[in-house]
Amino acid sequence: MPLSGAERSRIYREKMKQNPAKYQEYLELERKRYGEKKEDGQVKLIGGVSERERRRRRKYWREMKKKQPLVPP
């Protein structure tokens, strides 16, 4: 059975983490991609939205944080 996109991405990221130089390059590319999205307005910062939207987003973040599995120390 073929892998889903999420599975392929997870495997790709795991392989990238094995090589520190390539992993740093990957992180730099992701930072650049995020910066471009922010400049284009595709990503809005929390300070740039209305008070109602802030409450909605923060509530969503809290709910998602509760769903995250606990990582042992």
Image: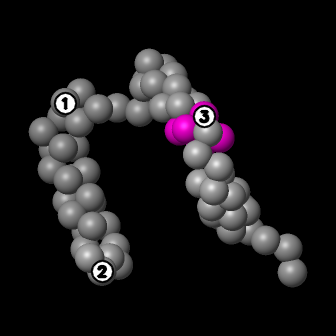
- Relative to residue 43, is residue 28 drawn left or right? right
Q: Which mark is residue 72?
A: 2
Question: In the image, is residue 37 above or below residue 53?
Answer: above
Q: Quadrant of the N terminus?
A: bottom right
- Secondary structure mostly seen in the magenta stretch: helix
User: Disc 2 marks which amino acid?
Assistant: Pro
Q: Quadrant of the C terminus?
A: bottom left
For the point 55% across and 38% down, the residue is 24
Q: Earlier in the sequence, mark 1 or mark 2?
A: 1
Magenta highlight on residue 15: no
Question: In the image, is residue 44 above or below residue 23?
Answer: above
Q: Residues within 10 Å of mark 2 (few under 14, many from 20)?
A: few
The segment highlighted magenta reads: 22-27
Residue that carries the numbered disc 3 in the rendered image? 25
Give the residue at the far right of this rendering. 1
Residue that carries the numbered disc 1 in the rendered image? 47
Separation of residues labelled 1 and 2 (CA atoms)? 33 Å
Query: Where residue 15 sits in the image (x, y, percent)?
Result: 68, 58
Question: In the image, is residue 72 above or below residue 10?
Answer: below
